[in-house]
């Protein structure tokens, strides 16, 4: 009985989600498409409702006292409201809005969305909002962003901050375009939805600014490295203080010029950033690896990356950084049999019996 109830609840939730998605699809306008009259909505503001109440009171006052002045004032205010409604509706009609991600985004941070607006003529006080609250409260709400622009010569651009909490391929948020111009009596609004996605990188660890270097096989001091770990680079003129063991005595016996042997260390193999070498859960490991990738790139050092099912050969530069961050963002931890059965990963039957 419990399973049947759970399946019924699951089907109901999925059906409600599909219904809401279909409703938003019918109400939303695709990005970079002009707003049509079928996707443009008008609703009264608080000031507009008070205005309508005043018109109604004046109209009832005129009926009760047969006052022509009250009649005239009521119809005059009603005509102003109708003009404001039409002007506000036309202020949004035909506007095109495009959304483009700007720069990189890390989980727990804020992505930047470049928004471009265009229309055939100038428009006034267009507000682009991110969040569910309407009106000016959207800008004060913790989860909302609101920017107001005027279209000069039919064009305008702005940048919105979009908080992102999880890594991976994320669809761009649905934006709301609204305006209460000219008098604030009504609010014309429309929803804009983009098909583009944004790749969110993992949250960098706390030690991203000073990631520890991996130990090298050789050191840079000439005296500390053994002779076998060094390559002969040539001779240079003797300088007082050079190690006697490095003096070229045979060269001195033939030419009479005292020289010193010069050795160079062979290049150390680039370090590997290994998923298996990190500790913690999946997100903790990816966070540590992300911090290491940023640190090695900042120091200009090459590195390699090993993930389950993926290996990036050691390299350096912006291309290697981008490849590594994209691999970390798209990484999906393989589900082990122990995890499926409810046991902790890495614990076998012998350990359980112990």
Image: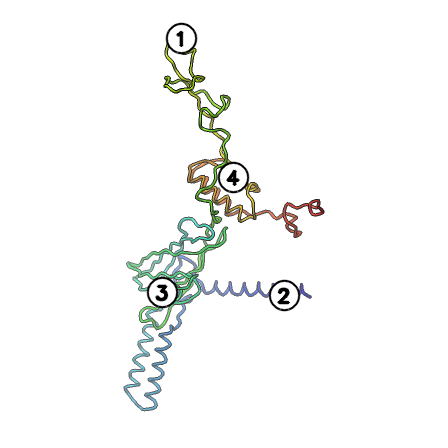
Nearer-the-camera pick, 257 or 287:
257
Residue topped by disc 2: 8
- Count of numbered circles on the image: 4
Label 2, secondary structure: give it. Answer: helix
> How far apart are the alpha carbons under marks 2 and 1?
97 Å
Q: Is residue 52 left or right of residue 282?
A: left
Of badges 4 and 2, the one in the foreground is: 4
Q: Is residue 314 left or right of residue 352?
A: left
Residue topped by disc 3: 92
When the figure is inspected, residue 31 is found, relative to residue 189, above or below; the finding is above
Q: Residue at x 44, y 50 (%)?
A: 105
Q: Are marks 4 and 2 in contact (CB under 8 Å)?
A: no
Query: Counting other residues with Cα less than 10 Å from the Cα at mark 1, is it few (<14), some (14-19), or many (20 or more)?
Result: few
Q: Position of residue 22 (x, y in %)?
A: 51, 64
Label 4, secondary structure: give it. Answer: strand
Residue topped by disc 1: 254
> How far apart are the alpha carbons under marks 4 and 1?
51 Å
Q: Residue at x 30, y 85 (%)?
A: 71
> How far apart are the alpha carbons under marks 4 and 3?
52 Å
Q: Which of marks 1 and 4 precedes in the sequence?
A: 1
Of badges 2 and 1, the one in the foreground is: 1
Q: Which mark is residue 273?
A: 4
When the figure is inspected, residue 44 is found, relative to residue 353, above or below; the finding is below
Q: Please, which residue is most extreme toward the bottom here?
A: 65
Label 3, secondary structure: give it. Answer: helix
């Amino acid at each position: 009985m419990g399973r049947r109830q759970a399946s019924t609840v699951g089907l109901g939730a999925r059906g409600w989600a599909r219904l809401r998605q279909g409703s938003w699809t019918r109400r939303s306008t695709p990005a970079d498409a002009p707003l049509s009259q079928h996707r443009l909505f008008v609703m009264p503001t608080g000031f507009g409702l008070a205005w309508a109440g005043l018109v109604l009171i004046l109209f009832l006052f005129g009926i009760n006292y047969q006052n022509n002045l009250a009649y005239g004032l009521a119809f005059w205010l009603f005509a102003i409201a109708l003009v404001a409604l039409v002007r506000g509706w036309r202020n949004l009609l035909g506007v095109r809005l495009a959304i483009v991600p700007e720069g990189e985004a890390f989980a727990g941070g804020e992505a930047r969305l470049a928004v471009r607006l265009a229309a055939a003529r100038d428009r006034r006080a267009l507000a682009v909002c991110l969040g569910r609250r309407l009106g000016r409260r959207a800008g004060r709400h913790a989860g909302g962003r609101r920017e107001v622009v005027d279209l000069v010569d039919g064009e305008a651009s702005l940048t919105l901050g979009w908080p992102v909490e999880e890594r991976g391929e994320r669809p761009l948020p649905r934006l709301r375009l609204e305006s209460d111009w000219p008098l604030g009596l009504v609010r014309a609004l429309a929803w804009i939805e983009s098909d583009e996605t944004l790749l969110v990188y993992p949250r960098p660890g706390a030690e991203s600014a000073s990631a520890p270097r991996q130990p090298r096989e050789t050191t840079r001091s000439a005296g500390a490295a053994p002779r076998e770990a060094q390559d002969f680079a040539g001779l240079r003129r003797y300088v007082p203080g050079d190690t006697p063991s490095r003096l070229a005595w045979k060269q001195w016996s033939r030419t009479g010029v005292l020289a010193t042997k010069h050795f160079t260390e062979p290049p150390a193999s680039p370090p590997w950033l290994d998923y298996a070498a990190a500790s913690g859960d999946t997100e903790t490991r990816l966070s540590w690896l992300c911090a290491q990738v940023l640190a090695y790139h900042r120091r200009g050092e090459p590195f390699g990356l090993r993930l389950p099912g993926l290996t990036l050969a050691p390299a350096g530069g912006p291309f290697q950084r981008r490849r590594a961050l994209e691999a970390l963002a798209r990484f999906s931890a393989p589900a082990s049999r122990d995890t499926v059965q409810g046991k902790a990963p890495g614990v076998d039957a012998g350990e359980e019996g112990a």
